[in-house]
Amino acid sequence: MSELDDLLRNNRDWADKVCQDDPSFFERLSKQQSPRYLWIGCSDSRVPANQILGLDPGEVFVHRNVANVVVHSDLNCLSAVQFSVDVLKVEHILIVGHYGCGGVHASMTGMRLGLVDNWLRHVGDVCGKHADRLAKVENDALRHARLCELNVIEQVANLCHTTVMQDAWARGQKVAVHGWCYSLSDGRVRELGMDVAGPEQLQPAYERALASMPVAGKRDE
Ligand SMILES: [Zn+2]
């Protein structure tokens, strides 16, 4: 009896149910994918792209890493972006952080976790860049929430600066980048006002997103 038997049984049950509802589902998907969305999110097990968006297999291209970071030298993330923009022609890229992110918290407190600390240095840089703003937040819980949001805003900016996005916009391709933050406590996404559909929109969106960020209390829903 394998510890994984439950998972394999779940898989068979799921595949059977999908086939019952739509007999040609897998045959259709095996031939081609045409997602309209790219999701760049945290690896956290509580933040699954498809379930949160209510989308089926084939509808969202996904890249996840610890603390949903977009780094200009990360070939893994850049390759997912390039393939989904240039080949799949996704129309919307969602960078989705989440409140209560352990990676963001570790970078804020300096907690040592191991090798991952080096990756989280990127979030530490965001923390340093916005140190003045974060110092005004009234308590650690809210500071953590604001840093989760600031991290998303900065990652949207990083993505917009990549050659992939700059080239796509230069040739007139319709593709927009959006910054969201997901709440583990109610399952809902907060829009951060960081929506960019062209290079000229980046700076105004960045300034708007920062200006609308609350210093005290939770974000309006
Ligand atoms: Zn996380």
Image (spheres, grey):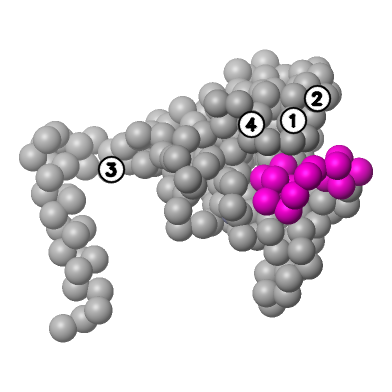
Q: Main secondary structure of the magenta part?
A: helix
Q: Secondary structure at mark 4?
A: loop
> Magenta stretch?
132-146
Separation (CA) of disc 3 from disc 1: 43 Å
- Number of disc labels: 4
For image coordinates 46% across by 28% down, the residue present is: 36
For image coordinates 52% across by 29% down, the residue present is: 90
Q: Which residue is mark 1?
A: 213
Q: Are marks 4 and 2 in contact (CB under 8 Å)?
A: no
Q: Earlier in the sequence, mark 4 or mark 1?
A: 1
**In this orientation, which residue lies closer to the viewer: 75 or 59?**
59
Of tags 3 and 2, the one toward the viewer is: 2
Q: Are marks 4 and 1 in contact (CB under 8 Å)?
A: yes
Disc 1 packing (10 Å; few <14; some 14–19; many ≥20): some
Q: Which residue is mark 3?
A: 30
Residue 211, numbered circle: 2
Q: Secondary structure at mark 2?
A: helix
Of tags 4 and 3, the one toward the viewer is: 4
Q: Disc 3 marks which amino acid? A: Ser
For image coordinates 47% across by 35% down, the residue present is: 188
